[in-house]
Image (tube, rainbow, N blue to C red):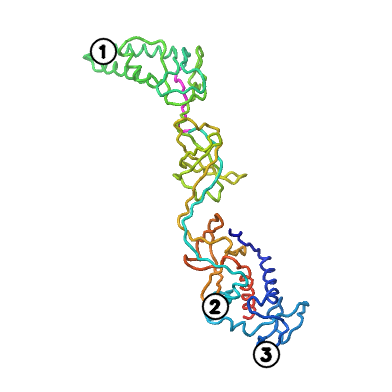
Amino acid sequence: MFHKVLRISALAAAIVLAAAVIFSGRVSALFQGSHPASQTHATGSEREVLYWYDAMNPQHHYNQPGKAPDGMDLVPQYAEDSSSQGTGATTAAAMPAGTVTIAPDREQMIGVRTGTVERESLVRTVRTTGQLTSDETKLAHVHVKVNGYIDKGYVDYIGQLVKKGQPLFTLYSPDLVATEEEYLIAKRGAKEMGTSQFPDVAQGSQSLLSSTRERLKLWDISDEQIKKLDETGEVTKTLTFYSPVSGFVTDRKAFPQTAVTPDMDLYSITDLSTIWVDADVFEYEVPFVKVGQTADMQLSYYAGRTYTGKITYIYPTVDPVSRTVKVRIEFPNPRFDLKPQMFADVQLKINYGKQIVVPQEAVMDSGDKQYVFVVHEGGVFEPRVIQMGAKLEGKVVVLSGLNAGETIVISGNFLIDSESRLKSAMSGMEH
C-alpha cells in the first residue's frame, strides 16, 4: 500500500535541507562509500579529500579537518565525488538543477524502488447519503373555479390511490346552474334565429352560445359533460369533478356539505411512479458529476436490493456548513416501494477516463509545488515538477509533467530529495 504524500512546508524544507547537509557527512558512505571524515589525502586504497566544508555554510571551505565555528565537525568533500558520476555526468549536467547521480549499489543501500508511469482507466465510486422526495413535476392540486358546495365525496381519505379520470366529488353551484340554463337558452335561440334573414340577429345568437359554452369550459366543465347537456337539454343540479392525474392523495379538504371557493386546495395528488433522491456531494467532487450519469441506491429497509437511477439536476448552491452540493437523482418506482422521506445510501460512479497516474508515495510536496524523481540511464535522478489532479485509492492523477512509460522513484525518494536539495544549494552558492 502506498504511503501518504510527504508534505513539507517552506520552514520545514529549510530544516530538512540543513539536516540533509549535516546528515550527508555522517552517511556519506551511502552515496560516496567513505569512512572517517578525518582523512586528508588518499594513499593506496584511501580516497582523496579535496577540502572540508561547514555543513551549515557549505560555501566555507577548509584545507584540513576540524571544527566549524558553530562547533560541528567539518565535512569532507572527496575527489571521486565528481568522477563517480561516470558516463552519467554529461547527462546530469544537462538536467535541471537538483539532478543527482547515484550508483546502483548505493541505490540498493538507501532502498530506492522505482516504477513505470502508466495510463489507466479510472473509475471512482462516491458514496453518500440521500433522502427520498416526491417528483414535484407530478404533483397536482385540485381546485374549483366557481363558488359552491360539496355534495358528495368519492375519495374520502388521505393516502388513497386514484386513477386519472376517477370521480373525486360532486359540486352544487348556483352560478354553475345559472350558466347551464343560460347555455340551453342560447342554444335554443341559436337554433331558432340562426336562419334569420337579418345577419346581425343570426350572428348574435351564435356569439351568445359560443361565449356561454366557453364560460363552462373555463370552469373546468369537460367536453363530455357539455355534450351530455346538449343531448339531454336538462340542467344538472350537481357536476362531478375528476382527478387530473393518477397518484396518491396527500392532502384533502373536500368534505360533503362544505362550502368551497376557488382559493381552496381541495385535493393534493402525487404521482409516485418515479421518485427523487437528493444526495449530498462534496464541492470538490461536483466537477466530475454530470447530468445523465447513473447512480445506484440501497435502502436498509430492503436488504440486498439495488435501485438504479439517473442524475437529472445539480443544484446551483453550496451548503455553507457541510460544503456539499445537492444532486437530484430520479428512480423509477413502479411498485411504490420507494416512499418520500426515506433515507438511502447512494453510490455515484465517476469516470475519469484514461489518465496518467502515479503512486501518492512517489510525489514530493514542498507546499508551493509537487514533483517526482524521474530515473534516467546511468543512475541519474531528475526532479520533475508535475501538476496534480484527483487523488484516489493511493494514486494521484498527473495532469502535466510526466509521460506514460517514464520511470520514477516510488520509495526511497526522501534521501534522494535531501541529496538533490544539498546539490542545488551548493550549486547556487558557488555561482
Q: Is residue 95 above or below residue 358?
A: below
Give neighbour class at mark 2: few <14, some 14-19, many 20+ (Cα, 10 Å): many
Look at mark 3 in the image and give the residue it sits on.
Answer: 43
Q: Nearer the viewer, residue 301 or 97?
A: 301
Instruction: Give the residue displayed 70% in from the left and 83% down from the top.
Output: 52
Real-space Cα separation, disc 3 to disc 1, in angstroms: 134 Å
The quadrant the C terminus occupies is bottom right
Real-space Cα separation, disc 2 to disc 3, in angstroms: 30 Å
Question: In screen coordinates, is 410 left or right of 40?
Answer: left
| Disc assigned to residue 92 | 2
Q: Nearer the viewer, residue 246 or 125?
A: 125
Look at mark 1 in the image and give the residue it sits on.
Answer: 191
Farthest residue, direction bottom: 43
Q: Nearer the viewer, residue 48 or 352?
A: 48
Mark toward the start of the polypeptide (3 vs 1): 3
The quadrant the N terminus occupies is bottom right
